[in-house]
Image (tube, rainbow, N blue to C red):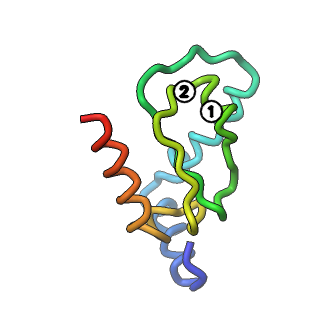
C-alpha cells in the first residue's frame, strides 16, 4: 500500500462504503479453516507470486503439497496490495503464467 495516508483511507473507504469489507476478509477465514483440516490436492495449474512485504509467505514445498504449482515467482518489491503497489510486475507475471498455458 502507498505510504500516503490518503491512499490508505481511500482503500479502506472503498471496502467499507461498498459493504464489501466482509468479503475481503473471507480468504483469511478460509485459510484459517484450511489449517485445521486436510484438503484434497488441486490439479489445476497454479501460480504463486511472493511479494517481499506481503503479510504471509508460502514456502514452495508447502504449496506443492496441495496445488499443482507451475509458476513460483519471488517478486523484487511489493506487498499485500500488489495490484495497487506494483501493477506492472503483477501484470507481467500473470501474462507470462497464462502464456505458458495456452
Q: Return the residue nearer the eye: 94 or 81.
A: 94
Mark 2 nearby-residue class (10 Å; few <14, some 14–19, many ≥20):
some
**CB-based contact (under 8 Å), mark 1 and mark 2:** yes
Q: Is residue 57 above or below residue 17?
A: above
Residue at screen point 38% across, 68% down: 88
Q: Is residue 94 above or below residue 4?
A: above
Q: Return the residue nearer the eye: 47 or 83.
A: 47
**x and y, in percent, of residue 78 in the image:** 56, 67
Q: Which image quarter: residue 102?
A: top left
**x and y, in percent, of residue 75 in the image:** 55, 60
Residue at screen point 58% across, 55% down: 74
Residue at screen point 42% across, 59% down: 90
Residue at screen point 71% across, 34% down: 32
Q: Secondary structure at mark 1?
A: helix
The residue that disc 1 covers is: 63
**x and y, in percent, of residue 18 in the image:** 42, 58
Q: Is residue 100 left or right of residue 58?
A: left
Mark 1 nearby-residue class (10 Å; few <14, some 14–19, many ≥20):
some
Q: Which image quarter: residue 77?
A: bottom right
Q: How many marks?
A: 2
Q: Residue furthest left?
A: 102
Q: Return the residue nearer the eye: 60 or 21.
A: 60
Q: Secondary structure at mark 2?
A: strand
The residue that disc 2 covers is: 67
Q: Residue furthest right?
A: 36
**x and y, in percent, of residue 59 in the image:** 69, 40
Amino acid at each position: 500500500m502507498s505510504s500516503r495516508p490518503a491512499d490508505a483511507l481511500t482503500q479502506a473507504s472503498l471496502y467499507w462504503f461498498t459493504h464489501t469489507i466482509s468479503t475481503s476478509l473471507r480468504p483469511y477465514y478460509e485459510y484459517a479453516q484450511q489449517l485445521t483440516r486436510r484438503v484434497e490436492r488441486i490439479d489445476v495449474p497454479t501460480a504463486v507470486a511472493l511479494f517481499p512485504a506481503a503479510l504471509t509467505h508460502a514456502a514452495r514445498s508447502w504449496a506443492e503439497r496441495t496445488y499443482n504449482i507451475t509458476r513460483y515467482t519471488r517478486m523484487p518489491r511489493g506487498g499485500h496490495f500488489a495490484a495497487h503497489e506494483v501493477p506492472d510486475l503483477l501484470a507481467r507475471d500473470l501474462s507470462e503464467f497464462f502464456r505458458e498455458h495456452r
